[in-house]
Image (cartoon, rainbow, N blue to C red):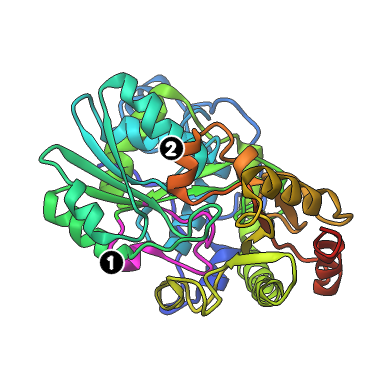
Amino acid sequence: MADKKLPRLTWPEGVHLDTLAVREGLPRTAWGENSEALFLTSSFVQPDAASAAARFANEEEAFIYSRFTNPTVTMMERRLAALEGTEACIATASGMSAILLLALGLLKAGDHVVCSHSVFGATLMLFGREFAKFGVETSFVSQTNVDEWRRAVKPNTRLLFAESPTNPLTEVCDIRALSAIAKGCGALLAVDNCFCSPALQRPVEYGADLIVHSGTKYLDGQGRVLAGAICGSESLINEKLVPVMRSAGMSLSPFNAWVVLKGLETLSIRMRAQSEAALSLASWLEQQDGVERVFYPGLKSHPQHELAMAQQSGSGGAVVSFIVDGQVSGGAVLARKNAFHVIDSTKICSITANLGDTKTTITHPASTSHGRLTEEQRQLAGITQGMVRVAVGLEHLDDLKADLLRGLTSL
């Protein structure tokens, strides 16, 4: 351990998460700023050569170089760790770089990973193709079938990886059950908490060892910057991940950290409002002609509804996916045509694959976020050509309904 710890804020016992989302970070500087300071500097001046030597050798904790130590980034890390209920956090340049850092810090050639085949398309590519180049084997299993996870475990399994809910089907995994499997084989469980954020779900409470985030989504909340993070114990973060970050440099910029830091202040308010609107929209979509099926954990028709309500603070989140008419009767070609028609008929929704914004976004997952996958991979994940994903923002709900109805009624 370092001889000198960076100063920490202290809070009354029992202080609520909404308060930590606004207040947690570093103490104010000597200038007494009320809004967190943005430190736009590449390096930090040391008081003398001996101090510099001690700090570079990790004998003292101090800010040295912004590739791996920066006050604004540290503030964002401490705030997110507090919200997730973990001891520590490490911020990265994007959500995908967080997964890359996770693998570089925890895995080596000959190791084995068990991963849901319903995770984000780029995550599938990273585990299935890129990590395989370096001798890491990955078995892909059903998101919801716990027995498949259990059967996939091998003597060399080191990591179980899931996202819950998944993108775009909003499938929910039993985090507690996967944690038991991981502990039983001496592996770690990592959960991508991007769709819920700590405002709705804290995977560590169900036994997850590491929580992964694309801060680009709800943590920022306004589509402004790219960011990623991993939350976990001090030992895992400091001993396994920080050394890789220090050498490899997939670090978050201070400016982007500052933007996310400010976004976290309104996280709970945004998530509550957007989730409430998403539930209303999903319920409405179930009643519309032109819609074959709706995927949303807050609906009783969702296969994992009860589990989602237990794990996700009784909320379904803010992402709704649905299949337009034509998937069953007309096949993939007609389904894709109809999905494109619904998307192109919108006047308010932003046609973009990003999500987590205050602006509602709409996309066709099979040709965007999961477009690089093979058709077999998409089928395994349940992503059909007729699927449309809507990430609900903060517009008036009646306007969003009218925007979607424009395309649905003209199919």
The answer to which image quadrant residue 396 occupies is bottom right
Can the viewer see residue 38?
Answer: yes
Q: Which residues are magenta?
A: 191-208
The quadrant in which the N terminus is found is: top left
Where's residue 254, x and y in %? 61, 37
Could you tell me which residue is drawn at 61 percent across and 56 percent down? Answer: 218
Of residues 37 and 187, the one drawn nearer to the viewer in this rendering = 187
Instruction: Give neighbour class at mark 2: few <14, some 14-19, many 20+ (Cα, 10 Å).
Output: many
Residue 368 visible in rendering? no
| Amino acid under disc 2 | Leu
Q: Is residue 38 above or below residue 111?
A: below
| Badge 1 element | helix
Q: Is residue 194 magenta?
A: yes
Estimate the x, y position of residue 293 in percent, counting from the top left: 60, 66
Amino acid carrying mark 1 in the image = Arg
Residue occupied by mark 1: 176
Q: Position of residue 371 (x, y in %)?
A: 59, 35
Q: Quadrant of the C terminus?
A: bottom right
Q: Which residue is mark 2?
A: 124
